[in-house]
Amino acid sequence: MPAVLDAATPDLLYADNDWDFERLKATYNAIEKIALEDLGLDVYPNQIEIISSEQMLDAYSSHGMPLMYRHWSFGKHFARDEQLYRRGFTGLAYEIVINSNPCIAYLMEENTMTMQALVMAHACFGHNHFFKNNYLFRQWTDAEGILPYLDFAKKYIAKCEDEYGFDEVEKVIDSAHALMDQGVFRYNRPPRLSEADRVAKAVARAEYEQKTFNDIWRTLPNIEEGDDEAEERQQEVKNIKLPEENLLYFIEKASPVLKPWQREIIRIVRNISQYFYPQKQTKVMNEGCATFVHHYIMNRLYETGQIGEGAIMEFLHSHSSVVFQPDFDDPRYSGINPYALGFAMMEDIRRICETPTDEDRDWFPDIAGAGDWRAVLKDAWTNFRDESFILQYLSPTVMRRMRMFALRDDADETHVEVEAIHNEQGFKDLRARLAAMYDLGMHEPNIQVVAADLEGDRRLTLKHAMHDGRSLDPKTREDVLWHVHRLWGHPVKLDEEDA
């Protein structure tokens, strides 16, 4: 047990709730030492920004990206979140962190010093390590180039609004946003340009369009592409092998009616959608990693006498709220808390490595008693996503502690059946059922371009491969098809097929 320290002890990093930049720097340095030397984390350089609650709300409203183009939906989200926050119905995140190099963490100025320490450990080292090392982020995002690209996107769309009118630009963004979930490459993609090359090409396209723009032709639909640009795009269309999973990519390249500036806006939206794609697959792991890291670091600061009892009690109060998991029959229950599940599994991995039971040795022979829990966790953070992580590492111990069970709910039956309980087979079924819940295919429709008559009537044919017999909601289906038609400009057909 650490010695009890008086609040005035000079060795403390801070002794009250007030923060200033000198305290932040000293506390950051202490956190960094534990993160790098004890946990052995590998992170991008950190850039910390202090923002107000209103700025945090603003960042919330635009996908958590403070540097973002304008769109009415962001204002709608801001107005909703601000009213809920001001009336006390909801709180705000203590931080926002951006997957970039340098990694940018936005901390709220209203935070106490303890909360600033917590979020620096959570964001600057937990999330940062995960962003830099997890295979999905390494394969699908470009941390070096995202900030310059967002800056370009914001300026480019603002320029389009000046040139072509706010309403015309908004129509394109509306339709592109409606298709964002179908605007990502999940399996295959064309050769990847660096973000710098992508921005350079976009700037060149914008400059060419500015040179050739003429107000006389503003209202005509046939503003021409440059010969080289058109030839390059047509070659890309020829290289697309159908079926194509990325609807926005196909429309951007092959639409018969889009003008060059409209294609660029669609490209911007799909690039941003692709940037967020790994985050949708790693919510449990990403938040679990950050929560495990902040919990370890804050406890080490206390154990080494760098923060006092008041600070550790404030931290534990906040941490327990973050990982709170309501029971299934609690009015507050809205599903499994990713912070709770991720943290519980990672704490359990440490336990299995250090003090395994016979059951652990049967279930996890490769890591039980291995001792080096840091290496096991870092390997998991690098090589798994939520679905595979749960399949590999969810233990009977965690399932017991969280009181998990599985129901079979058949619409043709009058009762539900408890299908998986706490026995050997039940644990295996529970693990498989829970992992399947984190498969994006369970939640996002699989819609692909299967045919496009580019020489005849220009009809575009889409196919929805149904999962478990679930068809598209009729209202949503018609709304989305309307947006596809707006961008394609010719007949669009959608077939459904039960896989």
Image (tube, rainbow, N blue to C red):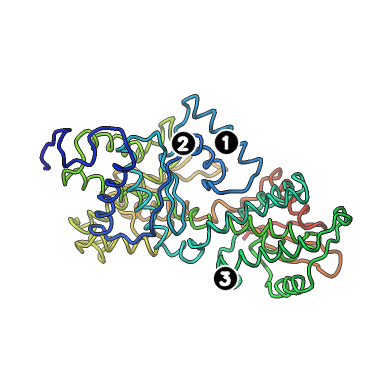
How many numbered markers are drawn? Answer: 3
Location of mark 3 (residue): 192
- In the image: residue 453, left or right of residue 127: right
Amino acid type, label 1: Phe
Mark 1–mark 3 distance (CA, rounded to whole Å):
34 Å
In the picture shown, does residue 355 fall above or below 411? below
Location of mark 2 (residue): 52
Q: Quadrant of the N terminus?
A: top left
Query: Of 367 and 19, which appears nearest the observer?
Result: 19
Location of mark 1 (residue): 78
Which of the two discs, 2 and 3, labels the residue nearer the N terminus?
A: 2
Amino acid type, label 2: Ser
User: How far from the left and from the top, in percent, is residue 10?
Assistant: 16, 39
Q: In which quarter of the image is the C terminus?
A: bottom right
Q: How crowded is mark 3: few (under 14 residues within 10 Å), some or many (20 or more)?
A: few
> Mark 1 touching mark 3, by CB under 8 A?
no
Query: Of 91 and 438, which appears nearest the observer?
Result: 91
Which of the two discs, 1 and 3, labels the residue nearer the N terminus?
A: 1
- In the image: residue 130, left or right of residue 213: left
Q: Nearer the viewer, mark 2 or mark 1?
A: 2
Query: Of 90 and 208, which appears nearest the observer?
Result: 208
Which residue appears at 19% of the width and 37% of the height?
308
